Every structure is written in C-alpha cells, then in structure tokens.
Image (cartoon, helix red, strand yellow):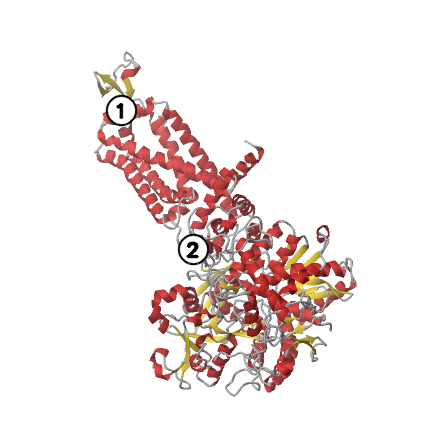
Amino acid sequence: MSQANNSRLLAVMNSTIGLKLVMATTGFVLVGFVVAHMLGNLQIYLGPTVFNDYAQMMQSTKLVWVLRLIMLGAIAGHIAAASRLTMRNAESRENEYEASLKSQTSSAAGKLMMHTGIILLIFIVVHLGHFTVGLIQPENFHFQEMLQGNVWVRVPEGFDTSTLAASELRHDAYTMFVRGFQGPAMALFYIVCNCAVMFHLYHAVASMFATLGLSNRDSRGLFKLVGIKIAVLVLLGNISFPIAVQLGFVHL
Amino acid sequence: MDLNARIPSGPIAKKWEKHRFDMKLVNPANKRKFDVIVVGSGLAGASASATMAELGYNVRCFCYQDSPRRAHSIAAQGGINAAKNYQNDGDSVYRLFYDTVKGGDFRSREANVYRLSQVSVNIIDQCVAQGVPFAREYGGMLANRSFGGAQVSRTFYARGQTGQQLLLGAYQALSRQIGLKNVQMFPRHEMLDLVLVDGHARGIVTRNLITGEVRSWAADAVVLASGGYGNVFYLSTNAKGCNVTATYRAYRRGAGFANPCFTQIHPTCIPVSGHYQSKLTLMSESLRNDGRVWVPKKKGDARAPKDIPEAERDYYLERKYPSFGNLVPRDVASRNAKLVCDEGRGVNGPGSNAVYLDFADAIKRLGDKGVSDRYGNLFDMYERISGDNPYRTPMKIYPAVHYTMGGLWVDYNLMSNIPGLHVIGEANFSDHGANRLGASALMQGLADGYFILPYTIGNYLATANKGKVTTDHPAFKAAEQGVHARTTKLLSLEGKRSVDSFHRELGLIMWNHCGMARTREGLQKALGLIPELRDRFWREVRVPGSGEELNPWLEKAGRVADFLEFGEVMCHDALTREESCGGHFREEYQTANGEALRDDENYCWGSVWEFQGVGKTPKLHKEPFSFEYVKLATRNYK
Amino acid sequence: MAKSMKITVRVWRQTGPDAPGHLEEHLVPNVGPDMSFLEMLDVLNEHLIETGKTPIAFDHDCREGICGACSMVINGSPHGPRKATTTCQLHMRSFDDGDVITIEPWRAKAFPIVKDLVVDRSSFDRIISSGGYVSVNTGGAPDANAIPIGKADADEAFDYAACIGCGACVAACPNASAMLFVGAKVAHLAKMPQGQVERGKRVLNMIQTMDNEGFGSCTNHGECSASCPKEINLDAIATLNREFMRASLFGK
C-alpha cells in the first residue's frame, strides 16, 4: 500500500465519519450475532438433547474460535469508536442550553445509547463469566451428559466419569442454562439487561443503515420499523428464557 | 468632472470585442503584484473577487455580513435573463438589448446595455459549470419562462430562489479562491471611507464590526460592489443592513452620483401591518400571471372580499390596459395601486394601503393543486407572514421600494470619474436606465463581476502605473482620523431617541415626497424637512454602547447619518428631472389619461451629481444619451 | 382590532466571547400578533435605548427567510416553534398572551458567542472553502445545454442547495454536529455532473475541516432536519456517508 493511501486511510479512520463507520460495521456484526444467538437459544424449548446437540456442535467446530475472535474484535472496535465519539460530542457543546432542547425526532433510546451501551458491556462480561467461562455460579458449569448407546443422558450426581472416553462425554449446557436462571435475582438481571439491549437496538439498526449511507427518504421509515422489530423480537426471545425457567415451563 | 464614457468606436455589436483587443493587458507574472480591494460580496462583488483572483490579482474582499454568502443578492426570487434563445422563440442578443433599453425608458447607455446582452449568454454557461441547479425540462435541458411581461422566454430560474443559487455559485467560486489564499476575505468589516492619493482611489478605511478596530487598506484599485440604496425609504424589500455608505463616502470624495432618483417600486409586496414594521417582503411578480388585481368600486367598502359581488369590483389593470392587463410593467402596476388607494379604495383597514390579488379564477381553472404547483412556496410565505390563507381569501398586496437604478457614475470600463475607483452591480448606474426589467439585476451583477470588470480593471492597472502607496501615507491617516471623529461624535451624543426612529421618519419623508409619484412642491418640502431632520438627528439621537465592540446601533447610526445626507441628493435629482420616465413619475408630467410623459427633447441625459458639502446643493453634470440603434419611442402598454 | 399581548422574554446576555452570560428578563407589553419575532425584539430594543439601557444584539439581515443570518433558540427550538420557518419569519401569532419566552444563541464549540445572541459561524465558511465548490475558472465553460441533467436529479440537487447556512442544524443537534450542512453541499454537488470530477477530494477535505472545527458527530437523531428552516432531508447525511466511504475506499 502506498504512503498516500496509508495516510488517507489513517485520516479516514480518525475522522468522525470514519469512526461512525466503525460503529456501524461492528454494530452490524454484533446485531447479527445477537439475533443468531437468540434464535439458537430458542432450541431450549426443544428439550435437552436438541439443545445440547446444538451446544456440542458449536463447541466442536474450530469456527467458534474464529467467531469469538471476530466478536471480540467487533466489541473492542465498537467500544473504542464509541468512546472517542462520545468524548468528542461532549466537547462539541461546552455550554448547555438554559431551556433544554426540544426533542422533535430523537428518541430516548437514541439519547441513551451510551448508557445502554455501558449496561451491555457489563451484561456481556457477566454473561460470559456465567455461561462461557463459568466464573459466576461455577457449580452450574460442570454438568455433563454421557453417551449411552446412541442416546445422551445426564450424568447422575456422584457418577465417576473417568472411565469414559472424551467422545462419550459432553457439556450439559441445558442444565447449566436452566439452573442459571433458577435464581430470581439472576433472572431479573437478565431481563433488565435485555431491556437495555432492546433500547440499544431500537436506535442502532436504523442508525446503522443511515451511517452506512443505505437509507433514504423512501426506506428510512422501513429501516426504523425493521430496527424496532428486531429490537422487540430479540427482547421477547431473550427474556422468554429466564421467564420460562422461573415459571417452570423449562425445567430439568 | 470628467464624464467621458469612453465608448469604443465602431458598430455596436463589435464594440466590446474591439475594446477587449485595444485594452492593455497585465503581464501574468505582474498580476500578483497588484492589490485590488472589493467592497461587497453579493453577485457582483463575489464574482469579481473570484474572477480577479483566478487571473492572479491579490484580492481583498470586505463585507458587513458575517459571511459573504448572506449578501442581499440572495433574496432575488424570479430569475436571470440571458439571450440564449433556447426556446427558439426569436430571442437574440439584439432583442434583449432592445428590450432593456426600451424598458429602461431610454435613460441608459446603449453600448453598455448591448455588452450586457452579449455576455448574458456566458453567465448561464458559467453558472451551470459551477453546478448551479437551474430548473430543467424532462429531457434534461434548461427550462425558461417569460418574466415581467417579456414576449420571449429568456428567463432562467431555480424555483423561486434564483438569486440564492447564483449567489451561492459565486460564493463558492470565491470560497475556492479564499481556500487557495488568493482572496483574503474580511466579513463583518464595513467600509467607512475611500482614500485618494494624487487623485486616484488607492484604498479604503474600514471598521471591524466585532472589535471596532478602524484600519486602512492600501491597494492599486478599489471596486465598490456595495449594492443599492433602497433603505433610504426605511421600509423596502432590501435587507436591514443594506446601505448607501460605501457609495456615498465615495461620492463625498468626488465620485459622481448618477440618476439617484431612479428607484424601482415593486408592485407585489406584502403590505405594511403596523408601526413596528421593519421591512417589506416581496413576492415574485410571477404571481401576476394568474392573479387578478382588484379593489372595490365603492370608497371605504369594508365588506370582506368574498362578500363583494363581481359587479362591485374594479379590476382596474384589466380595465385600463386591456392588452397587457395584470402584466403591465412594474412601474405602471405600482402607480395604479397607489392611485386607487389614494382614491380611498384601498383594502387594508385603516390607512387602506393595499389592493387584492385574487387567485379565485386560477383556482377554479387549475384547482388548489395546480396553483400550489406554480406558486406553492409563495403562498406559504404569504400565509406565514400575513396569517391569511391565499387559497381561500385574496392576497393583499402593495408596492414597495425594491431596487435602485441610480448609482455611482461609471464609464464603459465601469470606472467612476475617480481613476481606479470601479463600481459594479446595483451600486453603479449603468444599464437599467430609469426602470429595470424583471430578472435583469442578477444578469447585470454577474456580467459586471465575471465578464466585464476583470478585463477592464486590467487596462487601468496596466496603464495607470502609479507605484505603490502604503497606509502610512498622510491621506490614510487623515481618513482614519475622520472616521474616528465621526464615531466618537455619534457615541457622545446625549440624546434619547433611537437611530431607527429617525430612519423611520426619513423613510416617511422620502416615501411621501420622493416615492411612487413626485411633485415639485413635495420635493421642495422634502428638501426643507430632511436637513431639519438631520439636525435633530445629530442632537437627539442616542447611540448606546462603545466603539470597541460589536455595536449594531453604531453601525446603523453611521448608515442613517449618510442616508440623511443622501436623501437630499435624491430629491434634488427628482426635482431637476422635469419629466416622467420609468420609476420616476412627476405628477406634473403626465398625459391626459395619467400615463408618464417623457421629455426626450430636454432630459435625454443622465444626471451626475457632484458633492459640494453637507447641506449644499450638489453640482449637476450631464451625460447626454444618444440612441443610434433603438429608436426613441413612447412605451405603450394599452 | 387585533389583540395585544404581554410577553415576557428571558434573553441571553453576554458581553463578549469569554465573559460569563446570564438570562435577563424583560416584559414586552403591546405585542401584536402580526409582528414578527424580530420586530418584537426591535420594539424591546427601542425601549431599552430610550431608557438608557443596552439593547440586545442579534444577527439578522434580509428578514425574509433566505440570508440565514438570524439565529436564536426560542424555548429550546432553533428558530422557534414553527416548522420550516426562520426566526425572522416567525410571527407573534404563534405565541399567546402571557407567554414567557426563553431566547438563547446557537450553542456549539464551533460557533463561539460574539455577544448576546450573536455567534461566529465562520467555521461554515471554512468548510465550504475547503472543497464546497466546483473548480472552474470564469470563462471557457461549455454551452449550458451541453450536458443534459435529468429533471429529477436537478430538482433533488436544488433541494440540497436550498441550504441557507444558518446553523440551526448544529444548534438543534444533541452533538452540535454539522453533518446536515456539509451533507447538503456534498449531496448537491454529487448530484450534478459538474461535481463529479472533484467528488472524492471534496468530501474528504470538507469532512476534515468539519472535524477540525470542533463539530460533533452524527448520531442519527434527525433533529437537524426537523429544525431546518429549508427542510433539508436527512438523505443529505446518508449521501455524505456514502460519498465519504466511496472516497475513502477508492480515493475518488
């Protein structure tokens, strides 16, 4: 790459629109993940076998690491760009209006992007610690299923698995999932955080299309509607899990 | 006073070409060495600054607005004429020339007008190349309309915002040169004096409107593009800041002021609604294409317009001018509105100064939608200002001062009688005679700025060869001191009245006695009232604040003080011109049926006034006009 | 006879760029509904002058909604409550007897206050002079009809070119962003064939200047367009983003 190209790209990445484009592209990846994640998790309603098959499939592929790296990169990029832009924007108006600006088109969701974003970050950390790394509620993390014939069954408590081959054991994600949501406080935490997800997406999707230069006067309304629908569906899907567990629809 | 117009010899169609060849050129390498000052950043000033900078001159451009983009050219609505003949309807350079001379009521210089028509075609090319979004046909070609009663469609337009789009084109060209550092732009700077060294214009004195700093600027030539003086009437369609100060200061330094009484009154403006009224808003006269003008037949008829039956309405333009009807030229339409209001048939409540412009027939014919497609933005604007819905009730309109044809005298090179002082756009007197045609102001501003001055100024710079002066020269120091003294005096007055209250009073005197119709008695009366008002101003005005800060009232005070002197010059001019022509209507000189009576025998000249001192009658000089190509004839719109 | 109103204004007073400012209250009796907002301030100022006080400085010029000089935030709305209306064309019939009206200047780091309600908007001029033009010298332009331009394109270009550079978009934006202003000029010229040659350079340079002037970034709230007296569409911003991406990726 030539020197000129290099400096151009550097300038581009440092400009407000460049940063916005980072927000939008990483946002696109993240929205895609959130939707897919929610859809994948709906398999919880199909019982332990299907759900654990899904979990096993996800874990067995090398792709999951690629995906995790992409997600990590997207989150890091999203946060880095967001913090630079937020600081910039805070500086752009040194003195606030005495009579605060009247909102005509802006939504609370749009104005609270940074706040919901911070909640999301906390949520992601807790969620990873909870279900991915097992640092939170580690007691739920070690349940396993074993192969009996060609059927996976839950490993009974106290059962010695040391005699089993690795291919005959798998992580019991279903049990972790259900036990993870059995505590009302944790369930509430997930519900609240998913409300933040909903707010974030409510503004994010349409905003993403605008930043990517894809929306125009004809499609803007449509994109807004798509954004709201995605936000609401993600919310409904995701909060259904703790609620279903709490109400006993999904149980061990 | 040297009033040699320096018109090139030869047939009119060849004059400009010949002149361009005869003019001395400045060596490209030497252009950098020449400094040019431009005062004003409207169509003329911005286009001239940009073009001269492109040629290589060092340009300094000054404007009182906070940005050059706000100059009042921006408010022109209708369009810009050009002899392109794109519509194949028989237009030509010659026809535009003919129409302009005739429309100007034979009080302009043929050679200048011809050149204006010639370069009009280049203007459109230039503006399109700049990306100006003119109106277009579906096939992608430029659209034209007929405007102001012209019989060909030669007007290019960009909805109702042609002036804005053309100004932004010029502003962008200027901005490019600012970015390239070929033009230094000084917004919020007001020119308060012209500086002459050895009889040549060599600089100006400005006040920085933010800091109050008074400063001199030296140059090799000075260009005034400071617009017209319509605000002498207080109420006009001009922007609030428009003023005569730059040209008037030059006049005080010896520049001749030509035809100051030629002012144009626009017939379709929104009427005055109260004492607090600060300005008048024009609505494009294209409204007269479909609107019908009427007043009640009965005096003092207070009924709502819808309650006045057809038989009791007087469609006076259609009645008096059956062939042109509502489309008679601006001066005729305006004067007739005044006439019916003077008869007591006006329709705006007490004071009664308005006539109806009724779209009921057009709405019947075209529907609300059809009318809105043509005039939607104008109807919206009317509704915003008046609170009435013109789809349901007739508009009320009244004439208002709109444009001033008079200005500093210039020769064919657009140079005043002071060598080095060039004057372009509305600020000069050259092309419109006693009456300007619709859509010709934009044309003239850009013709001067893009295509005429940048050539002719080179000739001056190449031949005058006066050597550099600096602002250390005593003439600059003296001028600065004069500006300081005047500012100090204005701020030290311990009166009680606001500047505006005096301006309003002056405006009323001018409107009543030197407005749409003038009489000897009225003008003489005004010549008594103005000095008296001026004396009171210098005793009773209060200018708040200091000179070392942003002080809009100090700015205004200086401008009004100049108007208070300039008003007298206008009245002298109107009094001297004992005929009626174009925008100048003397009640003593009219035909039996009330039409203007021009006197070519005795008044076929431009008046050029020379300053003799404040309160002293200025000295009259004359530039005789001869008409070789357009035969002197009486306008007839019956 | 038209009704007469009593209006209380709370207006921002500030003697200079670095001086502290405050709201000052004045009662304006006898306000007529047909008065324009600026005429109401004229009446107040005249009273202040006659009573030996310092009148209120505000920018204004054409008073017919086209020059873009007037610039006040009225009760939290730039140019006041009426849609598609500049302050100078706002009339007092939009207010009621007894109203208390708060009047403030545009507030943005890139628009420093000069005095009272007057701000310095020269940053807009600097943005234009960094690229908001077609580099064509006077003379030598081809015939105006040499390049046909479709009516729809010409009309859309006009819609963007209608911007009056007043800065209401910046004043209304929660981030004091100038994207609508810049977008309007970029979109206008991008729509015209004459603007194609410098398309890429233009947008990169204008964005760089915009950022250097200290404007904030766009978060797609749409307040700019809603406050715009000329109703410049948000498509201007989407177009700007698109043009920027195109220029960043392809350098043209």
Residue C216 visible, this orientation:
yes
Q: Amino acid at mark 2?
A: Gly
Using residue B289 as the reference point, say whether residue B518 is left or right of it: right
Q: Which residue is mark 1?
A: A53
Q: Are marks 1 and 2 in contact (CB under 8 Å)?
A: no
Callout 1: SS: helix
Which numbered disc, 1 or 2, marks the residue closer to the eye? 2
Using residue C99 as the reference point, say whether residue B431 is left or right of it: right
Q: Amino acid at mark 1?
A: Asp
Reply above or below: B470 against B227: above
Q: Quadrant of residue C112?
A: bottom right
Residue C57 visible, this orientation:
no
Between B547 and B170, the one lying in front of the other is B170
Distance between mark 1 and mark 2 Cα atoms = 64 Å
Between C103 and B115, the one lying in front of the other is B115
Q: Which residue is mark 2?
A: B139
Residue located 36% across and 50% down the image: A218
Q: Quadrant of residue A68?
A: top left
Quarter holding the N terminus of chain B is: bottom right
Reply above or below: A76 against B233: above
